[in-house]
Image: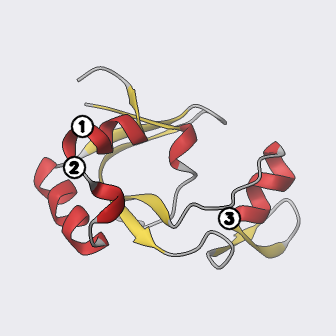
Amino acid sequence: MPVVSLFVYLDTNCPGWRNRPVDLVNRRLRQLGRRNVTFTHRGGSISGGVVQLLDCNPHDALFFYENENAWISVATYFYVRYGCVISLVYRIAVNKDHSDTAKPSPRSTELHS
């Protein structure tokens, strides 16, 4: 599979994903299997995880940001780090592997096999 953006991947493999229940889309993504994910906005990748969506507001999704030694929201991180304002994104992509760690915005994520 060629490298594609997360939105293209979801549109192609999970038609109507934006308007379907998250658990239904996640079942479809599990059926599609493991994927390698590359983060084009900052480099790095994750190998062999199953992409899943979280149904949450990026202003409410918190993580510990070591650079500031503080808990911040995903929306705050993207503004501070990249100057990007995240306003109407309701689902956050994650790549479920053994660490179950949340990943960055779908706009800056690519998938490949």
Q: Which residue is mark 2?
A: 14
Which mark identifies residue 59? none
Q: Is residue 97 visible?
A: no
- Mark 1: which amino acid? Thr
Q: Give the image location of residue 97, x and y in percent.
A: 33, 60
- Residue 107 image-quadrant placement: top right
Measure the alpha-carbon separation of dots 2 and 3: 24 Å
Of mark 2 and mark 3, the one earlier in the sequence is 2
Q: Residue at x 31, y 38 (%)?
A: 9
Which mark identifies residue 12? 1
Give the secondary structure at mark 3: helix
Q: Give the image location of residue 27, x and y in percent.
A: 16, 65
Q: Residues within 10 Å of mark 3 (few under 14, many from 20)?
A: many
Q: Residue at x 42, y 66 (%)?
A: 99
**Mark 3 and 1 residues: CB-CB less than 8 Å, in contact?**
no
Q: Residue at x 11, y 55 (%)?
A: 31
Give the secondary structure at mark 2: loop
Measure the alpha-carbon separation of dots 3 and 1: 26 Å
- Please say if 16 is above or below 57: above
Of mark 3 and mark 1, the one earlier in the sequence is 1
95 displayed left or right of 92: left
Q: Residues within 10 Å of mark 1 (few under 14, many from 20)?
A: few
Q: Residue furthest top?
A: 2
Q: Residue at x 29, y 20 (%)?
A: 2
Give the secondary structure at mark 1: helix
Which mark identifies residue 74? 3
**Mark 1 and 2 residues: CB-CB less than 8 Å, in contact?**
yes
Q: Is residue 93 visible?
A: yes
